[in-house]
Image: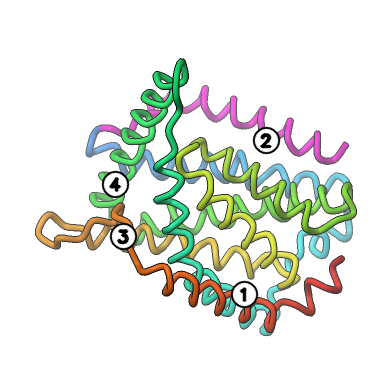
């Protein structure tokens, strides 16, 4: 019931936000002068669609214990765990990059070729718009609206909301983590970038469980988004930097970094993961 309420509330608010955005002329963002307003509106939409529903469900069904239910524990040790989670995320970047390249190489055949062509066209246009916005808006505004707000709101919705409820439903933390990761990746709407987001969603799910606090996965998510903002900001016409280009690291580097990530995660978060089963 709580999961249904969460989904329906988010869907209704998404429709209302979309209608309001169209009515106010804020659904485009193609004109340079409107891009700052555009990302501010998108940040507001993130708060409404992803931030408010899990808080509302917590207040409706967990009144008096909503802070504990959402894992809003911001004590000093949780910040140390959050920093460890960021390092784990960084170590998994080569693997994520390899998955992104492999996933982008997927192709549909037969009658699905036109579907693939259209999906890639939409994805390229969306990526071009995001790139132009990140290059032209002030970096601090981009960090706030593109990195911080989505990290906080999406982690509230997917981990504190959906994953939390699925774990109580399935009685299995791993099923809850990976089902939520699949939903997290699908909601972003990019089939040819599904796998790297799926891996990211799984990592964020385990950080939430093992870290015992929302701040652990929020900080890792923020760092992931902030890296994108940072590299697009560096990518001036004369810099020679292409933030969309793959790293093309040797497979041994990816394997070594992934092994180090697993080891660090188990040492840091293994105990918290065991107690959450």
Residue 139 - label? 3
- Please give left or right for residue 242 compared with residue 110 in the image: left
Check whether the beta carbons of the residues at disc 4 and disc 3 lie within 8 A of each other.
Answer: no
In this picture, which residue range is highlighted in magenta? Answer: 1-30
Q: Secondary structure at mark 3?
A: helix
Specify whether residue 4 is painted magenta.
yes
**Which residue is rendered at x = 59% and y = 25% of the image?**
15
Number of numbered callouts drawn: 4
Find out whether the residues at labels 4 and 1 contact each other: C-beta distance under 8 Å: no
Q: Is residue 23 visible?
A: no
Task: Say which label, 2 or 1, has the lower sequence index.
Answer: 2
How busy is the neighbourhood of tag 2: few (under 14 within 10 Å), some, or many (20 plus)? many
Q: Is residue 134 left or right of residue 78?
A: left
Q: Which residue is label 4 attached to?
A: 131
Of the numbered discs 3 and 2, the one sitting upstream in the chain is 2
Which residue matches tag 1? 262
Give the mark toward the camera: 3 or 1.
1
């Amino acid at each position: 019931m709580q999961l249904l309420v969460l989904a329906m509330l988010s869907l209704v608010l998404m429709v209302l936000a979309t209608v309001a955005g169209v009515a106010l002329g804020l659904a485009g963002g193609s004109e340079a002068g409107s891009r700052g307003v555009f990302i501010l509106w998108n940040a507001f939409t993130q708060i409404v669609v992803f931030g408010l529903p899990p808080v509302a469900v917590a207040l409706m069904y967990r009144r008096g214990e909503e802070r504990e239910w959402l894992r809003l524990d911001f004590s000093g040790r949780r910040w140390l765990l959050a920093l460890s989670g960021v390092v784990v995320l960084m170590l998994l970047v080569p693997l994520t990059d390899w998955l992104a390249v492999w996933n982008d190489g997927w192709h549909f055949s037969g009658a699905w070729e036109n579907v693939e062509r259209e999906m890639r066209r939409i994805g390229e246009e969306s990526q071009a718009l995001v790139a132009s916005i990140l290059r032209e808006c002030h970096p601090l505004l981009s960090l706030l609206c593109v990195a911080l707000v989505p990290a906080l709101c999406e982690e509230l919705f997917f981990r504190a909301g959906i994953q939390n409820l699925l774990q109580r439903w399935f009685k299995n933390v791993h099923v809850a983590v990976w089902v939520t990761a699949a939903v997290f990746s699908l909601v972003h709407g990019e089939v040819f970038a599904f796998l790297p987001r799926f891996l990211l969603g799984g990592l964020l799910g385990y950080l939430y469980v093992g870290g015992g606090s929302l701040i652990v996965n929020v900080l890792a998510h923020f760092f992931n988004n902030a890296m994108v903002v940072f590299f697009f900001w560096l990518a001036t016409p004369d810099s020679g930097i292409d933030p969309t280009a793959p790293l093309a690291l040797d497979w041994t580097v990816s394997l070594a970094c992934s092994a180090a990530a697993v080891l660090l995660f188990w040492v840091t978060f293994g105990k918290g993961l065991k107690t959450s089963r």
